[in-house]
Amino acid sequence: MRRKNIVQCAAVLALVAGGLLTGCSQNYADERGKGDAPVKGKKGDDTAAEVYNMPDDFSNLATKCVGHGFRAYVTTQGWVEIVKDESCAS
C-alpha cells in the first residue's frame, strides 16, 4: 500500500512539474500571442520606457517614443495605443 502511494505522489509531481515547465516556456507564450514580436536583424530600440505603477487590480502603464513623432502606450493587460507626439520627433 505504501509503495502505491509513493508511485502516485511521484506521478502527480511529474505532471505538475511538466505543466509548470511547458506553461512558462517562450514557445508557449509565442503560440498564445503573448511573446515578444521578432526584431528585424535582432537590433531594436532597447531604451527604457517610462513605467507608471497603478494600484492593485489596475494595469500598469508604460510609454516611450517609437519611430519618429509617435509615442506608444502599453498596459500589462495588452492594451496598446500609438499617438502622434511632437516631442518624439528626433
Image (cartoon, grey):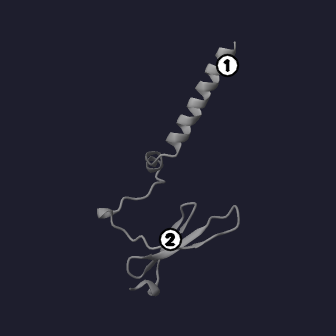
Q: CA separation, marks 1 and 2? A: 54 Å
Front residue of 46/55: it is 46
Q: Amino acid at mark 1?
A: Asn
Side (left or right) of 10 relative to 39? right
Task: Look at mark 1 in the image and give the residue it sits on.
Answer: 5
Q: Position of residue 27 (x, y in %)?
A: 43, 46
**Which is nearer the N-term, disc 1 or disc 2?**
1
The N terminus lies in quadrant? top right
Front residue of 69/19: it is 19
- Seen at 66% across and 69% down, the residue is 54
Side (left or right) of 42 relative to 47? left
Q: Amino acid at mark 2?
A: Glu
- Seen at 57% across and 62% down, the residue is 76
Residue 56 sits in quarter: bottom right
- Seen at 52% across and 41% down, the residue is 21
Q: Helix or strand or loop: what does disc 1 sit on?
A: helix
Residue 50 sits in quarter: bottom right
Q: Helix or strand or loop: what does disc 2 sit on?
A: strand
The C terminus lies in quadrant? bottom left
Residue 45 sits in quarter: bottom left
| Image vertical order of residue 66 relative to residue 55, above or below | below
Other-residue count near label 1 (Cα within 10 Å), few / some / many at <14 / 14–19 / ≥20: few
Task: Look at mark 2 in the image and give the residue it sits on.
Answer: 81
Side (left or right) of 36 relative to 75? left
